[in-house]
């Protein structure tokens, strides 16, 4: 048996933890409580998009917190994007399903937050759905997350992702007792301020990673100048969910996450990445 709950809202300030507290016409739905009989969040569905009010780029992610989260707060990458101009734009972002197994506590509250990182694009709209289940969704039954984000200043340059929006120094310690990365959730995009094409990928290393540095592709983008009098389209990159990566790690050791934009320099890539750990 499953139950579904939702929260949505706007994020209008950079690096600011913003509660999502409404559900459209339900302007005051009250606390989001874990439904009766539910033991896990087995999926998170999220869509997010910018209002294109500034010619710059961003990344975005969500936080799940509160007493209903049995194993503590979790964070998930959601989106990245950018605008070459602030005078026009029109786009849509599909919802992304992120399969997870987060144990929950029945009748306790879960708080949903969202953030905008990178640079201020004016505002982000978020909608987040939580899928509750009376049993786990298969695979790892108690997942933990580490989420980081950052901006890549130049092409073909290894850049450490060290921040998490309003949290300037998030922990990069693999949770104790966890032995592998089971999935990666990531998004990358730029403003598209220069002509060319660029590909984006992650490097995952550090003392915690067994078997050497791991390289994971994320996305790619391209841009050519539009004709006079036209406006360039925005970039919108919903997070991609890379399943079954099964990267062995050492619990309680430090992990390092870098991002790169290869090829042409099309602007400033904005990258957000979540590592999901299992036992």
Image (spheres, rainbow, N blue to C red):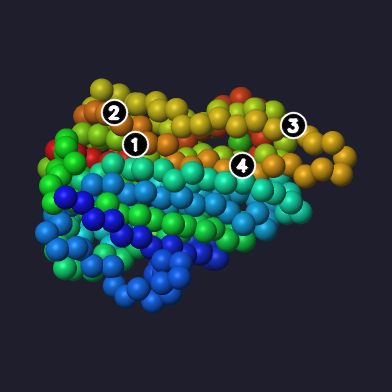
**Label 3 near label 1: C-beta < 8 Å?**
no
Residue that numbered label 2 is attached to: 245
Tag 1 secondary structure: strand
**Label 1 near label 2: C-beta < 8 Å?**
yes
Please provide percent x and percent y for residue 121.
61, 56
Question: Left or right of 137: which side holds 225?
Answer: right
Please provide percent x and percent y for residue 274.
36, 43
Residue that numbered label 4 is attached to: 235
Tag 3 secondary structure: loop
Residue that numbered label 1 is attached to: 184
Q: Going from the N terminus, do you reach mark 3 or mark 4 first? A: 3
Residue at the spot 57% in from the left edge and 46% down from the top edge:
92
Q: Going from the N terminus, do you reach mark 4 or mark 2 first? A: 4
Residue that numbered label 3 is attached to: 224
Residue at the spot 67% in from the left edge and 35% down from the top edge:
266
Q: CA distance from mark 2 to mark 1?
A: 8 Å
């Amino acid at each position: 048996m499953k139950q579904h709950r939702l929260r949505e809202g706007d994020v209008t300030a950079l690096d600011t933890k913003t509660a999502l507290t409404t559900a459209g016409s339900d302007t005051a739905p009250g606390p989001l409580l874990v439904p009766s009989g539910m033991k896990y969040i087995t999926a998170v569905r999220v869509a997010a998009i910018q209002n294109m009010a500034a010619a710059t780029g961003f990344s975005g992610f969500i936080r799940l917190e509160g007493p209903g989260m049995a194993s503590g707060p979790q964070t998930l990458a959601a989106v990245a994007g950018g605008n070459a101009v602030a005078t026009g734009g029109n786009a849509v972002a599909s919802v992304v399903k992120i399969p997870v197994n987060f144990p929950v506590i029945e009748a306790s509250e879960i708080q949903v937050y969202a953030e905008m990182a990178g640079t201020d694009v004016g505002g982000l709209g978020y909608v987040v759905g939580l899928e509750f289940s009376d049993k786990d969704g298969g695979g790892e039954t108690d997942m933990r997350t580490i989420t980081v984000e950052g901006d890549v200043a130049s092409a073909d340059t290894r850049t450490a992702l060290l921040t998490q929006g309003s949290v300037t120094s998030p922990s990069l310690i693999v949770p104790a007792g966890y032995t592998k990365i089971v999935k990666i959730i990531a998004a990358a995009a730029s403003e598209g301020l220069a002509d060319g094409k660029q590909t984006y990928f992650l490097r995952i290393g550090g003392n915690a990673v067994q078997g050497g540095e791991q390289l994971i592709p994320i996305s790619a983008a391209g841009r050519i100048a539009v004709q006079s009098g036209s406006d360039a389209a925005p970039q919108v990159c919903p997070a991609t969910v890379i399943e079954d990566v099964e990267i062995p790690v050492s619990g309680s050791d430090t992990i390092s996450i870098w991002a790169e934009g290869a090829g042409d320099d099309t602007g400033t890539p904005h990258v957000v990445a979540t590592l999901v750990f299992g036992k």
